[in-house]
Structures are given as structure tokens and as C-alpha cells.
Amino acid sequence: MVAKKETSAEKEKMKKQLKKIPVKDIKVTKAMTVDDMLQAMGRAGGFTAQKLADATDIAEKMVKKEGCLKILSFPACIMATGTRGIIVDMVKNHMVDLIITTCGCLDHDLSRLYAAYYKGDFMMDDALLRENDVSRLGNVLVPDDCYGYVLEDNLLPMFDEIFAETQSMSTHEIIDKVGEKLADVKGHEDSLLYWAHVNNVPIVVPGITDGSFGCQLWMYYQTHRKLRIDLFADEQMLSEMTNDAKYTGAIIIGGGISKHHVIWWNQFRGGLDYCIYLTTAEEYDGSLSGARIREAVSWGKVKANAKKMTVEGDATITLPLIYAGLANRLL
């Protein structure tokens, strides 16, 4: 391919564009809000600070856009941290219309409703933790009696009621029914499942059996052999929601099945109109987690002219900052 030779006029135009926005120093004051800092970062020019500020601006446009279906996808791990509160607030404050996540999200949301997780350290002795019936998720400690046993004790009785009238449901229907039943549980206002039910935000878990919640469904199946999980009903709803929307936008955290389900269904409508991707992964290995938004453009899963930004960094840092900016501007 022969490179196009630029004309003098095109070069002059490029020079003007390159010198259009000067870099500004960040000035910190006592009265500065998180949103003030984000806007200062947006004027700072580099490096990921600029991306974070731009992502917040895109998120604001997405939330405010009339007729835009707002999708949030994320892996389970952040629900084991205090960032769960950010996701709950986003749902509570109508910044999300649809969630696609993994089974562990349900596990952690429900487990933390009934018991506590604890602060730990990445460098703790894992063999010693196992001897003391404690699992480590990064630097979060999950005692055995706060996880599987809690879910078994509380979910199986719920399933008796949920499946009393029908033995075939989609994942989003089952999750909604569980969310409804949390209204009588102490601390239910901290639960994602509860607020998703209240605000009619479907939670779809394509890999429903890959976690403790799904394991409880499997255990229930041992004595209720007519039980069926209707995954096609989930896919039908995703197809209808994305295709019926005038615009679609997504905040995608991490990769895997959650990310792919978001971009997969959006390709059939010509791609996402807004997309923010928060990741810590590298793209050189060809992984979905590492793939930047621009790669999704090549597949038709994000529109070429979409408002989009990839932000590299731990989502337990980046998502709270983005939400704090949105809360200041929109609430």
C-alpha cells in the first residue's frame, strides 16, 4: 500500500490541530471534589488520567442520552470488595438498565448480606489460611462459614418457593425472584440483587453453573429432576433489548463471558454507540480481556464513530472515581 502524500494545506491543518489544546497543571485545593479532580486530570494531558477523565465524560453522555440502553458488565471479584457499593448505587440511581455478569457476583452479593468478608493481604500464608478454613481472594478474606454454607442454608428454601409454580426459568428470572425475597433480610438495601429487582434491572448470568449459586441450583436439581434453566430466554431478552433500543452504551469491566455477551449482542444492531472499558490486561496475547475497544470496532461490535475509551487500571480505583464524577454531575 502506498502512503498518501499530504498537501501543504493538510499539513497546516494538522499543525493547528496538534497545537489546539495546551497541557494544564493540576492545582489541588482543600475544597476540591472528586469531580473537580477528574476535570483537572482531563486538562492535564497525560497519561491514564486523561483517559479516566474522558471516560467519565462519555459515561455522563451515555447516562443522559434519551433512548439509550445502559449496560454494565463485570466479573465477580469486585463484589467481594467495597466497590460492590458503587455498583449498587449505580443501579439504585438508575444509571444501569441491564447487567451481565458471572455466577460469583451472586455468590458474593448474597454471602455478604448474611455474613462478613474481611481485609487481608496478598502475601498471607495460603496454606495456613486453608488450615483455618479461610479462602483468599486477592487481599480479601472469605471464611468458609461466610460463603458456601450460608448460601446453602438460605437459597434452597427460597428455591422451594420460587419453583413452586414453574420448573423452567431463565437466569434473569431466577435472580429477580431471589432479589424480591431479600426484602425481609436484614441489610437488604446493601444488596445488588435487591435493588436490581426494585428497579427492574435484569441480571443475566450466561455461565450460571460456574459458582456457588449455580451449585445450589444443581443440588436442588438432585431432588427436582424436572427443573430447567432456560438460557435461550436470557438470550431472547438480550436480543430484544439491544435491538429495540435507539442507542446502546456499556461500561465493561474486565473480559470473559460477561464482556463478550455485551459486545456479541450489540453487533447485530451495528455496534455500541457508547463504550467504556476498564481493564488491567495486556493485548499482546490476543485475549478478550486484553482486547481494546478498537478491536471490537473491527468486528462491528462497537461503532466506528462510537464515543469510546479504554482505561487501564484496577476497577476498584477507576470505577469509584468515574461514579463519583457522575454522582456530582447528575444526582
Image: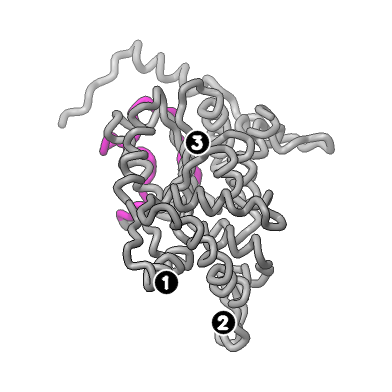
Could you say where residue 69 lies in the image, as x and y percent from the top left?
A: 45, 31
Q: Is residue 107 visible?
A: yes
State the residue at coordinates (48%, 50%).
74
Q: Which residues are magenta?
A: 286-311
State the residue at coordinates (67%, 54%).
184
Q: Are marks 2 and 3 in contact (CB under 8 Å)?
A: no
180, 32: nearer the viewer: 180
Q: Is residue 289 visible?
A: no
- Residue 11 colored magenta? no
Mark 2 vs mark 3: in front: 3
> Dot 3, crowdedness within 10 Å: few (<14), some or many (≥20)?
many
Could you say where residue 153 lies in the image, as x and y percent from the top left?
A: 57, 71
Considering the numbered disc 2 on the image, is that residue within a helix, a strand or a loop? helix
Numbered badge on residue 184: none
Going from N to C along the chain, the mark reached first, 3 or 1, is 3
Could you say where residue 99 lies in the image, as x and y percent from the top left?
A: 47, 44
Determine which residue is flagged by label 2.
Answer: 126
Q: Is residue 54 left or right of residue 132?
A: left
Determine which residue is flagged by label 1.
Answer: 219
> Dot 1, crowdedness within 10 Å: few (<14), some or many (≥20)?
few
